[in-house]
Amino acid sequence: MENLNHALFLWLNAPEHPSTLLLAVATIFAEYAIWALPAILGLGWLRGSEHTRKILLEATASGLAGLLINHIIGLVSQHPRPFMIGLGHTLIPHAADSSFPSDHLTLLWAVAFSFLMHSSSRVAGLALALLGLPVAWARIYLGVHFPLDMVGAAMVGVLSAWLAFREVRMYLPSAYRLTLSVHRSLFRKLIQIGWVRK
């Protein structure tokens, strides 16, 4: 399996002298596409209904659960990144920590899969899930992840979305009350002038 992982990585990884345009595109997807998440969650919260806000909190719980699962996996089994074993070309800086699964993709897909579990947020979920594909390619192309790191991220994303959905009654009521209280305190003036929902 590791031989296949290495072979697929070398096939997808950038050549020694990549195209400037392709390098720029890959860098945008690898390092900046993740910012779509706070933008969607933040704007959705500020303008959304109670139903929407609860879905956003569930998706946030899914993302956090995914990162926690990844951390536990990293503690139990360290997997080196390609540049740590001298494989391929690395074109962006990255800490020499465990590569499996990809945190970037886990977070993105954990939120996406959580959205996909609700009919009202399915379009956003599909868009984020599809955004994950070029993100996965870019992080392999730039030399900081193996292909199987992305498979692992998909598996953790599905698991965390399922856990967040299954246990929603355990955490959502109190999380919603707390978050709403903080929201009303922080945005009191904007709520009064109608720019932000109460």
Image (cartoon, rainbow, N blue to C red):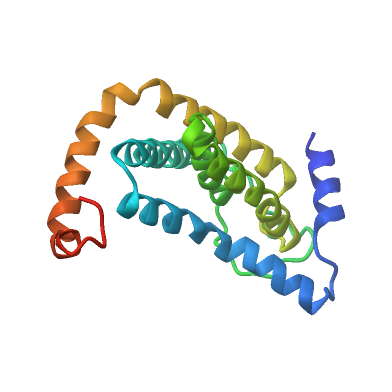
**With 141 as the anchor, is 180 left or right in this view?**
left
Residue at x 77% of width, y 76% of height = 21
- Location of residue 170 with respect to 74 vertically, above or below: above
Asked if 64 appears above or below 94 in the picture, the reply is above
Vertical side of 139 occupied by 170: above or below: above
Q: Is residue 133 left or right of residue 5?
A: left
Residue 3 screen position, x and y as percent: 83, 40
From the viewer's side, name the closer residue of 167 and 17.
167
Q: Is residue 93 left or right of residue 89?
A: left
Residue 129 location in percent, x, y? 62, 43
Taking the spot 69% from the left edge, 49% from the top edge, the residue there is 133
- Residue 76 in view of the camera: no
| Rendered residue at 48%/25% (across/down) | 162
Q: Position of residue 44 (x, y in %)?
A: 38, 51
Q: Residue at x 43, y 36 (%)?
A: 62
Residue 174 % position (x, y): 20, 32
Outermost front residue:
194
The answer, for residue 115, to whether it is visible in the render is: yes
Residue 138 shown left or right of residue 57 in the figure: right
Above or below: residue 75 compared with residue 193: above
